[in-house]
Image (cartoon, rainbow, N blue to C red):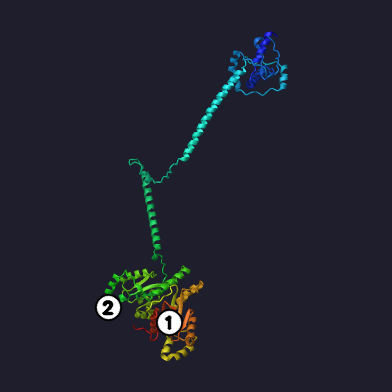
Amino acid sequence: MSQTSVKQKKKNETGIRYSKESLDGEKRKESEKSGARLSTQGSQELLPNTDSQGYLVRNQSSRTSRGQPNKPEIEEPRSRSNSIKPPDSSTTSRTSSASPSQHDSPPPPPVPPSARQSAPSQPSLQLDSQPPTPPEAQLTSRRRSSKQHDTLESKLETRIDSRSHSILRDCRDSKQREYPLTPPMEWKSYSQRRMLYPSNFPMDPDCLAESHQHQQREEEEDEDEDEEAYWESLKKFYEKVPSCSRPRPPKPKNAITIAVSSRALFNMMDARKIYEEEGLEKYIDYQLNNENVILTPGPAFRFVKALQHVNARLRELYPNEQDLFDIVLMTNNHAQVGVRLINSVNHYGLLIDRFCLTGGKSPIGYLKAYLTNLYLSADSEKVQEAIKEGIASATMFDAAKDLGYCDTQLRVAFDGDAVLFSDESEFISKEHGLDKFFQHESLFENKPLAQGPLKGFLEDLGRLQKKFYAKNERLLCPIRTYLVTARSAASSGARVLKTLRRWGLEIDEALFLAGAPKGPILVKIRPHIFFDDHMFHIQGAQKLGTVAAHVPYGFSQKYNP
């Protein structure tokens, strides 16, 4: 080997030391090229030699002298103190152009030492003719690329920071802002939305007819809703009115009908006086001029109120009960007077729905048509007519004193003979004296007495009492009956009690006075009505404040006014 080739070799060894990263890519590239060459030529691939720092050592002798044979390269020991000389300008220019491609490919794996030891036995491959790139140029390019990369990263970070700050600022501003809440749009029908269009807007006739039909349907629905709302409000209004909440009257065939005259129910003494002194026309004019003047209560007023209380208690226990008291206003007044009577009835809240105004004729003929069980009137002649017709009747007399009455219990007091019973014992006592009367009663003690005119009314009261007893209401029963008789209990009382037992009737209290006055006892009882056939007892009770009813029945016991 010549001295020139040795110097050239040393010069090339100092200039071909590359950085580890660039040579790794070049190793893989050269290995790919050598593999391609070996596959075509059929030769084996040789591993390249590296210096002490891991750089690839190329054989440059082929460039200077092609005729010389390839010789193994001398491997120098690795030392960090070796100085790196700058390469020539020609080699720098050549490697600078090839360096970008070298960075693109990834570095190959490192060669093991066993492969390095076996490599000298094989001839080294000829590398590319391009000169290697010096390490200084590689470092400069790497610094430039790193600076560009840092600049791009800083710009990108600045842009991201500015954008994040703007997003945070917008979020903060949106929290501080208060947007107004817009109400939802109200639904409008087609006919209403059609009004928003211009008048000259063309429209299909079928669509127009459909819109008209839709509008008519909406108007009809609105009218129906308004009508329903009107009737609902009217219903609520009338429910508050007492007259509309009144119960329906019972059916006449099931009810206990009590017929009461206008003069028995109300105090009409002034109007009666005008009728007797001035005639019928003046009487009618007086009633028409005072039809808005409420009449004052009469003798039967408290009795009628007590009957209504019994009905209310029965409806509580038996909602569908029809066996109730039914009050009928039976009078011979003219129909023109009916307005004042109706106003007075409604004013006091009396549940009287059936009226009979006969216009001057006797109402007795209507009593049976109304299925009357008891007739109360202030006219004794009409009462006698009713007694002859077989209808229980009594003439009402107002009390001289105003006593307090029980509002929660109907109290009815009866005399015995000629009221509940027949007048046969009364006839014997008047014709044959008291001794014959006592003998007769003891002789026929077990024979029931014949029934009197008020026996049917006592049966009605007893039937209603049993309805309350069935509901365990015996102590709170709103009906209480009394027997107040002038008989003696020892001599003639047993026959009376046995007669009631035979009839199946119960009397709550039996008072035998043996001829004593009944007035003081009645004051203690305070009945709503007291029935008796003697005017002596009627007047005595009336003076002490008891409302009495005379029953004109029996031998010589008719009341003559």
Q: Quadrant of the C terminus?
A: bottom left
Tag 2: Cα neighbours inside 10 Å, few (<14), some, or many (≥20)? few
Residue at the extreme front of the image, as rendered: 81
On screen, residue 512 above or below 174: below
Image spot of residue 535 (x, y percent):
38, 83
Residue 409 seen in render? yes
The amino acid on which the numbered mark 2 sits, given as a three-letter code, is Glu
Which residue carries the number 2 mark? 277
Tag 1: Cα neighbours inside 10 Å, few (<14), some, or many (≥20)? some
Q: Quadrant of residue 383?
A: bottom left
The amino acid on which the numbered mark 1 sits, given as a three-letter code, is Pro
Image spot of residue 302 (x, y percent):
40, 74
On screen, residue 74 above or below 181: above
Task: Classify mark 1: helix, strand or loop.
Answer: helix
139 to the left or right of 362:
right
Mark 2 and mark 1: Cα distance apart in space: 38 Å
Image spot of residue 338 (x, y percent):
33, 70
